[in-house]
Amino acid sequence: MNTLLIVCIFTALIHFAETTALSMRLAGVYTRQVASSISFVNIAFLIARLSNMLQAPLLGAMVDLTVEANSGFTPGQLNHNFRVVIFAAFLGNLIGAFLCLALSEFLPEQSEFLKKKVPCRRYFLKFFIRGTLKKCCGVFAGQHRVF
């Protein structure tokens, strides 16, 4: 797989996780379950930091290849690559911003479900099979009220 594509995926994931952390905080304030929302926020930040740890060496390798004389990688290509990475960050923020309202409705239900101490298998089955994903996406169609 292309190094630039991997860096772009990690960058978009970092910005998406940090943007959706805001909706997780909003859901915690809305339901008065601040401790549960803080745990969701910590999970999102953990994903972002892990992605950053994996992304940084790849991005540094692109710069190192430009500095080497015989690599065939020009500064113009590096400039283009950084613009693509910045665009991936924009896309991650944009997707996170669009999903902010949907997640602020979706997360209080999930925190209530997690309070029942069910296994992770049942949690993911409920999410994908019982239509929670459809309800989460229904916010955009105007079928569900957010607040």
Image (tube, rainbow, N blue to C red):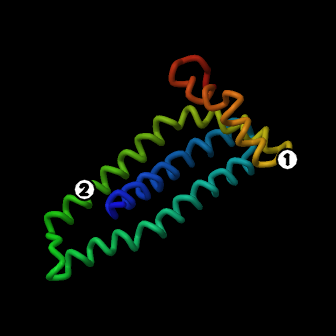
The structure residue drawn at horizontal position 15% and vertical position 73%, both measured from the top left corner, is 72
Residue 125 at x, y percent in the picture? 72, 38
Secondary element at tag 2? helix
Which residue is situated farthest in the top direction here?
A: 143
Above or below, comparing residue 13 to residue 110 in the picture: below
Side (left or right) of 46 relative to 130: left
What label sits on residue 117 in the rendered view? Answer: 1
- Under mark 2, the amino acid is Arg
Front residue (pair 35, 90)? 90
Picture quadrant of residue 104: top right
Front residue (pair 133, 1)? 1
Q: Distance of mark 2 from mark 1, alpha carbons?
A: 45 Å
The structure residue drawn at horizontal position 79% and vertical position 39%, both measured from the top left corner, is 113
Give the total number of marks visible in the rendering: 2
What label sits on residue 56 in the rendered view? Answer: none
Side (left or right) of 83 relative to 108: left
Picture quadrant of residue 39: bottom right
Side (left or right) of 143 relative to 129: left
Neighbour class for label 1 at 10 Å: few (<14), some, many (≥20)?
few
The structure residue drawn at horizontal position 57% and vertical position 32%, both measured from the top left corner, is 102
Question: Considering only order in the chain, which callout, 1 or 2, is on the residue closer to the N terminus?
Answer: 2
User: Which quadrant of the rendered structure holds the N terminus?
Assistant: bottom left
The structure residue drawn at horizontal position 19% and vertical position 62%, both measured from the top left corner, is 79
- Under mark 1, the amino acid is Lys
- Residue that badge 2 annotates: 83
User: Which quadrant of the rendered structure holds the C terminus?
Assistant: top right
